[in-house]
Image (cartoon, rainbow, N blue to C red):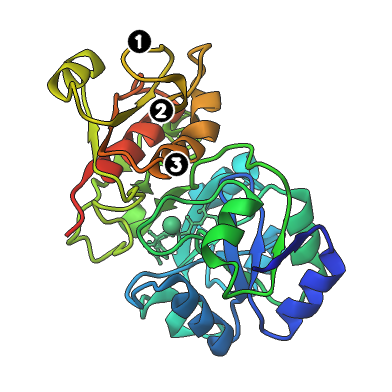
């Protein structure tokens, strides 16, 4: 197992030696390495068992540093950065040469984010390179929102996990691109679409698919628990699977059908932000119970609810 702790100095030393570290952000924990060093980046793909056609997000401490590795920052991007960085928003820019092709899977664009976590900002300010960091989970599985999640799944492959507590947003960043003058949402996430539209006007939303070469990582079957998972009307699903050993992931209500430990309520007070922070913990909890099936329901499709529903839909998509 990796060491878990809050030794920022040690983290900086490891990163300077091109080692990988689990780092906290407000969205999910990242598996971080030197984004300017192809060896460190290659290790990220290896540890995550991630296909090399799925590009990584590069994390920087401020806009000046972003300018060191991207060609230009369009005006709309600048406005979004001013409004939401540091925060759960990733912007796509034309990359400079200094970013290895491995980071972007050969694309000429790079995904960039300034994360909002004091420990990770401190680390980013103290090193001379940005950090490439995908979510710190094995490829295709549920993202980690606690240091222990990272340790449990990747701990034997990395030396250290920087423990910054529970992620305050709990769902990955919203990804936005600016191709051909359009503002397009490539991944619905922790930065609300409604808030983005207040700054830059109407945006396009690009539906995810397995065949979307722009963002190959956004596949239908991401975020999947290992247990079969079905989303729909919970009363109907509970009736349908009577007699089976099932778990329930519900938005705000308890259903009498299963014992309490097999039932995870996302937010008893019907709060979508709270539900987002608890989504991946809930999926992991139920996934560890050896159930035959997990049933769930969509939450109100507004604000962070849209990101939650996106993840539920993808968790349901069949693995093959
Ligand atoms: O909240 C987050 O974004 C977290 C934390 C750690 O920052 N990171 C994260 O990384 O979710 P990851 O690797 O799990 O997801 C990154 C997504 C992938 O789906 C990838 O396809 C997309 O970003 N992406 C990366 N570079 C891209 C590019 N140049 N164009 C389009 N999509 C890109
Ligand atoms: Mg991920």
Q: Is residue 279 left or right of residue 129?
A: left
Query: For numbered disc 2, what is the local secondary structure?
Result: helix
Element carrying mark 1: loop
- Residue at 33%, 62% (x, y): give it: 217
Lower sequence index among marks 2 and 3:
3
How far is mark 2 from mark 3, CA to CA? 27 Å
Q: Quadrant of the N terminus?
A: bottom right
Q: Quadrant of the C terminus?
A: bottom left
Distance from Cα at disc 1 to Cα at disc 3: 32 Å
Q: Which residue is mark 1?
A: 256
Are the two marked residues, 2 and 1, in contact with CB atoms closer than 8 angstroms?
A: no
Q: Nearer the viewer, mark 2 or mark 3?
A: 2
Q: Which residue is mark 2?
A: 262
Earlier in the chain: of badge 2 and badge 1, it is 1
| Residue occupied by mark 3 | 189
Q: Is residue 110 above or below residue 181?
A: below
State whether label 3 is within 8 Å of ligand 1: yes
Work out whether 271 lies above or below 277. above
Q: Residue at x 30, y 25 (%)?
A: 298
Residue depicted at 23% across the width and 51% down the height: 220
Q: Earlier in the sequence, mark 1 or mark 3?
A: 3
Q: Is residue 12 left or right of residue 1?
A: right
Which one is in front in this view, the residue at disc 1 or the one at disc 3? 1
Q: Nearer the viewer, residue 256 or 64?
A: 256
- Asked if marks 2 and 3 touch (Cβ < 8 Å), the reply is no
Q: Give neighbour class at mark 3: few <14, some 14-19, many 20+ (Cα, 10 Å).
A: many
Label 1: how many residues lie within 10 Å, few (<14), some (14-19) or many (20+)?
A: few
């Amino acid at each position: 197992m990796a060491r878990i702790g809050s030794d920022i100095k040690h983290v900086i030393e490891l990163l300077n030696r091109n080692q990988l570290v689990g780092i906290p952000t407000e969205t999910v924990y990242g598996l971080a390495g030197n984004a300017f060093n192809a060896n460190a980046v290659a290790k990220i793909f290896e540890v995550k068992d991630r296909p090399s056609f799925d590009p990584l997000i590069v994390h920087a401490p401020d806009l000046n540093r972003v300018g060191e590795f991207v060609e230009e920052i369009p005006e709309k991007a600048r406005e979004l950065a001013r409004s939401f960085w540091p925060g759960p928003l990733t912007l796509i820019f034309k990359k400079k040469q200094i970013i290895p092709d491995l980071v972007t899977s050969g694309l000429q664009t790079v995904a960039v984010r300034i994360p909002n976590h004091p420990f990770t900002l401190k680390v980013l300010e103290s090193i001379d390179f940005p950090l490439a960091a995908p979510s710190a989970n094995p490829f295709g599985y549920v993202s980690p929102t606690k240091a222990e999640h990272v340790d449990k799944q990747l701990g034997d492959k990395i030396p250290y996990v920087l423990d910054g507590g529970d992620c305050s947003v709990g769902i990955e960043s919203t990804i936005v691109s600016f191709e051909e003058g359009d503002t397009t949402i490539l991944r619905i996430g922790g930065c609300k679409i409604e808030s983005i539209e207040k700054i830059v006007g109407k945006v396009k939303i690009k539906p995810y698919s397995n065949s979307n070469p722009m963002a190959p990582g956004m596949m239908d079957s991401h975020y999947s628990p290992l247990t079969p998972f079905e989303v729909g009307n919970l009363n109907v699903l509970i009736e349908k699977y009577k007699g089976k050993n099932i778990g329930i992931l519900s938005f705000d209500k308890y259903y009498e059908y299963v014992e309490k430990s097999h039932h995870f309520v996302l937010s008893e007070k019907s709060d979508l932000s709270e539900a987002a922070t608890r989504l991946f913990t809930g999926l992991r909890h139920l996934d560890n119970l050896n159930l035959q099936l997990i049933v769930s329901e969509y939450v109100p499709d507004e604000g962070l609810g849209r990101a939650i529903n996106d993840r539920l839909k993808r968790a349901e998509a069949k693995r093959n």
